[in-house]
Amino acid sequence: MEDVAFLLCYLVVLGVFAAATGTVAHFKGRNVLGWTLLGLLGWVPLVIVACLPNLKEQAARDAHIAEENRRLREQLRQERIKSESFRQHAAARLDAHDQHLGLDTRTAGPALGAGSGTAGELGAGGGLELAAGNAGGGGMDAAWYYGRQGKTVGPVKATEITDLIRLQVITRETLLWSESMADWRPAGARAVTSSSELRKVGLRCADNSSNRASRIPAFKGNDMERRAKRALITGITGQDGSYLAEFLLAKGYDVHGLIRRSSSFNTDRIDHIYQDPHATNPKLTLHYGDLTDGSGLRDILSKCKPTEIYNLGAQSHVRVSFDMPVYTVQTDAMGTIALLEAIRDLEQQTGYPVKFYQASSSEMFGKVVETPQRETTPFHPRSPYACAKVYSYWQVVNYRESYEMFAVNGILFNHESPRRGETFVTRKVTRAATRIKVGLQKKLYMGNLDAKRDWGFAGDYVEAMWLMLQQDKPEDFVIATGETHSVREWIEECFDLLDLDWKKYVETDARYLRPAEVDLLLGDASKAKRVLKWQPKVKFKDLAKMMVDADMKIAQREKVLADHDQKGRKG
């Protein structure tokens, strides 16, 4: 170090002297060429000394890069060791799986074997072989077909597999499958039928004569079984939520429901299917939460890890939305975007695809531009509720197109049942008519009697919701009966069932009129009938009778209680 310092000092002194002498001589005109050269050479050591700190920094960076390369090489070596361990473990499981099915590994089932390439090969007999590649220094390539809504993501590299659990997640949800093994089809995967499709995901046919992946079953067993069907329903205590929960439980789902905290019980619609949370493996679980609480939604999704989410929760009363527009937008619009974001986070964290159903509404059509209304009909909303639903509709489309989420809109026209809220027009009529019949009520006050709606049965419509999430690709559907009836017709039908003249009991009240009315809604559900194979079962008159009969039982019980109370007061 002392020698280097001495040399540097010498160079600095020599450079300064030469530069100064040469510069002075140059300007005085003495031997111009020689002194000029001496002056220029004198500046060289000064430049070297000035650049020395940068050279030291560059040397330090080079040393750091060399150390980082050494560390990465060691990490790669460890990953190769892990990959070999995973390959052996998975190969043992696959062998056991094939033996259980009675299949030959090379000709009928997926096999995980050694190979010289970095991509999986399709054996001559149709068996999938995952090659533990050694070309180019690459580790094992898990060449699963990673299909998401029918789109190719590509093979998953070994460096992305951090442990055996991750490998199992990949194999459970993204495995190749075939039409002949449809019963074992994993969620999110689709059939691969040609060698060209295989090449898209890094697979190639080992034999040119083999063009079809015709016998590639999904895994069964403890570690590589399909994910259990688990649904989360927002608005589970509402009319649609209760019917949907019943439907999914009958299908074998684990059902989770989102309910708002309240000081009074509001679960009467699901009391008949409620299960004690202390029971062993309950099929129905309720979670306190709110659509306006984004962080709470994330926590609930992380806990229950649903495969399907049905967003039915909303402030759904159109007339009330004029009185509470801000709250309506917070729940019906911002609640949807909060839920979509929570789903996106869950998918990124776990790698599990989640299917999302958004309850859209025929009210979005509003001031209709064509009749009947279908999936391509433009929207013209005429209430805060409808505007919020339009926002949610387009956000679902946006997330589907931007993030490849399986998200669909169900544009449901009016659907009713005995579980309908008593402030909604159909139930308001049946409750009043039956109470008038037994002498508990004298008048029914209504708003616009000329508005026409396409009314169906809620129990039929929840099946359509479920069918939308069972399709290979996400699409939006109109769900309707294809018939329209006025409010006046509904009143007349319900009162006729009770042998009452509705004109004697029904009066109009301007308080129930909307600031902007929707005059006519009539849905065209031909796409749903064609694609989903769905059609309504309950007709208009049958729906009216169903609701009148149910409300008559309630009115008769109320009559008994009222008579008892009256006798008690007289006594």
Image (spheres, rainbow, N blue to C red):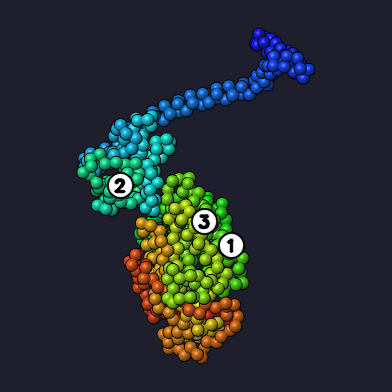
Image-quadrant location for residue 220? top left
Relative vertical location of residue 333 with respect to residue 342 in this rendering, above or below: below
Amino acid tagged 1: Gln
Give the quadrant of the C terminus.
Answer: bottom right
Badge number at residue 302:
none
Q: Position of residue 470 (x, y in %)?
A: 36, 58
Callout 1 touching callout 3 (CB < 8 Å): no
> What residue appears at the point 53 percent right and 71 percent down from the top-left corner?
381
Relative vertical location of residue 81 with respect to residue 39 in this rendering, above or below: below
> What residue appears at the point 55 percent right and 87 percent down from the top-left corner?
507
> What residue appears at the point 41 percent right and 40 percent down from the top-left corner?
166
Name which of mark 2 and mark 1 comes first in the sequence: 2
Residue receiving disc 2: 196
Measured Cα–Cα span from mark 3 to mark 2:
38 Å
Residue receiving disc 1: 330
Image-quadrant location for residue 327? bottom right
Give the SS element for disc 2. Answer: helix
Image-quadrant location for residue 508? bottom right
Question: From the viewer's perspective, is the residue at label 2 or at label 1 nearer?
Answer: 2
Residue receiving disc 3: 339
Give the quadrant of the N terminus.
Answer: top right
Name which of mark 1 and mark 3 comes first in the sequence: 1
Task: Decide which of 57, 281 is in the foreground and name it.
Answer: 57
Q: Seen in the image, is 52 located left or right of residue 83?
A: right
Amino acid tagged 2: Ser
Q: Residues within 10 Å of mark 3 (few under 14, many from 20)?
A: many
Give the SS element for disc 1. Answer: helix
Q: Seen in the image, is 146 located left or right of residue 235?
A: left
Q: Position of residue 250 (x, y in %)?
A: 36, 61
Task: Decide which of 402, 298 is in the foreground and name it.
Answer: 402
Name which of mark 3 and mark 2 comes first in the sequence: 2
